[in-house]
């Protein structure tokens, strides 16, 4: 199947997962179906956030969840590049000199998670990137042409799902489409950014950079830094 499965087959795979759980189709089912169909270790999906970088929506497993958060913390990587440029971005071998040169801070951290290859498919509305579907594999190598075609179809399905919910179609809101705890956890990150902004007397964009830099420096998850800020365990001073 050099041309991939096609839209109808992919929609059927996604719908079958939702039907098995007796729930409406959500982003969770898109990511899980994508992971199973393309034979990758994990999948994450993020949308562009208020602060300019990606905001995690769902991840199929702990490694994928940590991988996308690392990209956002560092501010660069295949997913962030796809979100910025609107093109498919692939690193078929993170151990290659090209990947190490392009993302020197990120690659060692992804490698420590066991991620060896990354494939990022943009979600674009009217040619404007609004999100990215990112696939992670535990071994190097390119995806077959059919898998590349299917990967973009899964990304397009996710985009349509998000746009339908935002427009209030089918009587569903965005919260019904987004599954899992990542959106709630990331809301705490944004709240902590506001606190740091007030502590330092700077704009939220700069405050976000300070939080990300702190998380990177102390090798801590960005969400953990946010919790520490909100709990009063960390205070940023000028």
Image (cartoon, rainbow, N blue to C red):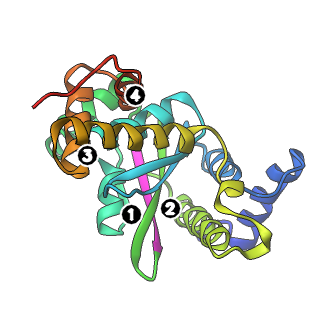
Residue 75 numbered mark, or none:
3
- Nearest to viewer (mark 3 / mark 4): 4
CA gap between label 2 and label 1 equals 9 Å
> Helix or strand or loop: what does disc 1 sit on?
loop
First of labels 2, 1 by sequence position: 1
Q: Does residue 93 appear in the picture of this structure?
A: no
Which of 214/113 is in front?
214
First of labels 4, 2 by sequence position: 2
Looking at the picture, does residue 58 appear above or below residue 106? below
Quadrant assignment for the N terminus: bottom right
Name the residue furthest top: 233
Q: Which residues are magenta?
A: 117-124
Q: Which residue is mark 4?
A: 230
Q: Which residue is mark 1?
A: 88
Within-10-Å neighbours for mark 3: few <14, some 14–19, many 20+: some
> Helix or strand or loop: what does disc 3 sit on?
loop
């Amino acid at each position: 199947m050099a041309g991939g499965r096609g839209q109808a087959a992919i929609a059927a795979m996604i719908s079958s997962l939702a039907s098995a759980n007796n729930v409406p189709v959500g982003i969770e089912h898109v990511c899980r179906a994508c992971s199973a169909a393309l034979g990758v270790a994990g999948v994450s999906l993020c949308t562009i956030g208020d602060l300019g970088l990606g905001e995690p929506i769902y991840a199929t497993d702990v490694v994928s969840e940590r991988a996308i958060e690392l990209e956002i913390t560092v501010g660069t990587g295949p997913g962030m590049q796809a979100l910025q440029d609107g093109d498919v971005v692939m690193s078929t071998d993170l151990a290659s000199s090209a990947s190490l040169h392009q993302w020197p801070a990120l690659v060692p951290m992804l490698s420590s998670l066991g991620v060896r290859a990354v494939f990022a498919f943009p979600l674009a509305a009217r040619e404007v990137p609004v999100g990215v579907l990112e696939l992670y594999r535990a071994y190097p190598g390119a995806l077959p042409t059919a898998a590349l075609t299917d990967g973009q179809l899964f990304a397009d399905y996710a985009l349509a799902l998000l746009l339908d919910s935002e427009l209030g179609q089918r009587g569903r809101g965005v919260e019904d489409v987004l599954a899992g705890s990542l959106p709630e956890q990331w809301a705490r990150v944004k709240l902590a950014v506001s606190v740091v902004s007030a502590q330092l007397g700077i704009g939220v964009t700069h405050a976000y950079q300070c939080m990300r830099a702190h998380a990177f420096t102390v090798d801590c998850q960005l969400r953990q830094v946010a919790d520490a800020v909100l709990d009063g365990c960390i205070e940023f001073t000028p």
